[in-house]
């Protein structure tokens, strides 16, 4: 039997972007234990409705949620 890992999740929409963060349950938002993705809510082109990018180009659990707006997304 396989158990699915449960994470704390934060979701914030700010203008054209929606930020999604996940970390171990009980993690503080100022700890470098988050993986963060960013959704661009406006169409990129005629064929794309949504563009998803990852903080620093990876899904590692080493970002700080409080810094989500200043991180480089690839």
Image (spheres, grey):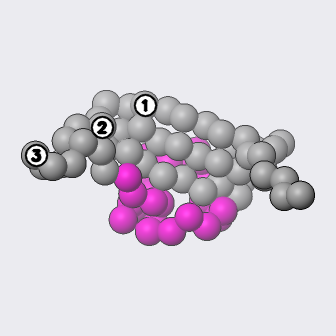
Magenta: main secondary structure = loop
How busy is the neighbourhood of tag 3: few (under 14 within 10 Å), some, or many (20 plus)? few
Distance CA(mark 3)–CA(mark 2): 14 Å
Mark 3, residue position: 46
Mark 2, residue position: 41
Measured along the vertical axis of the image, is residue 41 above or below residue 55? above
Q: Nearer the viewer, mark 3 or mark 2?
A: 3
Mark 1, residue position: 13
Label 3 close to label 2 by CB (< 8 Å): no
Residue found 78% across the figure and 52% down from its top: 5
Measured along the vertical axis of the image, is residue 18 above or below residue 61? above
Residue at the limit of the structure toward the left, as seen here? 46
Q: Nearer the viewer, mark 2 or mark 1?
A: 2
Give the residues drawn in magenta, as a range: 52-74
Q: Earlier in the sequence, mark 3 or mark 2?
A: 2
Q: Is residue 30 visible?
A: no
């Amino acid at each position: 039997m396989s158990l699915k890992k449960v994470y704390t999740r934060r979701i914030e929409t700010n203008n054209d972007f929606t930020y999604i963060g996940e970390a171990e349950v009980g993690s503080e938002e100022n700890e470098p234990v988050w993986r963060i993705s960013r959704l661009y809510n406006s169409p990129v082109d005629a064929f794309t409705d949504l563009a998803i990018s990852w903080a620093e180009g990876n899904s590692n659990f080493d970002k700080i949620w409080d810094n989500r707006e200043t991180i480089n997304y690839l």
